[in-house]
Image: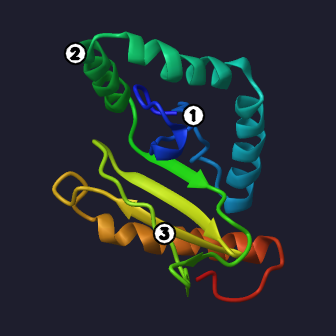
Amino acid sequence: AAVGCADPWDCLSNDWTFVSCALDTSSDAASARLHANARYLSVVRDSAHVAACYQFSQEGMPALPVKQQQELHRALFEEHALVFGNIPGPSEEVFVFGQQVRALQVVFQTLIPHVFALSLNGMIYMNMVADPDVLPEVETLPNFFIQELAELGLSFGVAGDPV
């Protein structure tokens, strides 16, 4: 629950942690990058490092003075080029006020570009938040992502438009 929130049902909070990862971007083939990153991330995910990061974010950071929290966040973001997040959402239809939710997007501003993926009812929805003054050709990035998906599809025998 959120710090200082008496009733967890009335709180809006996140139960996640930031974990730094050095991903493979140098392999020539998309499938080689995928396999290398999957192996690396499975080791990271199952390591004590993730638990330590989570514990610090839940208990260590809130115990620090606000100024020190801000300095640590700034230092963390200075060392990274991109934040990628994902949430596995509901695998079935969702209704709000009697209306079916047909798509979901997660958008929030961070100090560096942020890509977020969210699933809903068998579909994945993605977006990127970035400052065009900092990343001037940001609109070209989705095309690279689609090309990567198409290459992965070909390498695994999956036909069709990746979009």
Tell me which label, 3 or 2, sits earlier in the chain: 2
What amino acid type is highlighted by mark number 1? Cys
- Residue on which the image places disc 2: 67
Amino acid type for the residue under numbered disc 3: Phe
Q: Is disc 2 placed on a helix, strand or loop?
A: helix
Farthest residue, direction bottom: 160
Cα distance between the residues tagged 3 and 2: 39 Å
At 26% from the left and 17% from the top, the residue drawn is 66
User: Is label 1 in a helix, a strand or a loop?
Assistant: loop
Q: In the picture provided, is 151 more to the left or to the right than 83?
A: right
Q: Please tell me in which quadrant of the rendered image residue 83 appears.
A: top left
In the rendered view, tell whether residue 8 sits above or below residue 157.
above
**Residue 157 x, y percent position in the rendering:** 83, 78
- Looking at this view, is 108 or 145 the one in front? 108
Q: Quadrant of the C terminus?
A: bottom right
Which residue in the structure is indicated by mark 3?
144
Q: Which residue is mark 1?
A: 21
Q: Residue at x 23, y 56 (%)?
A: 131
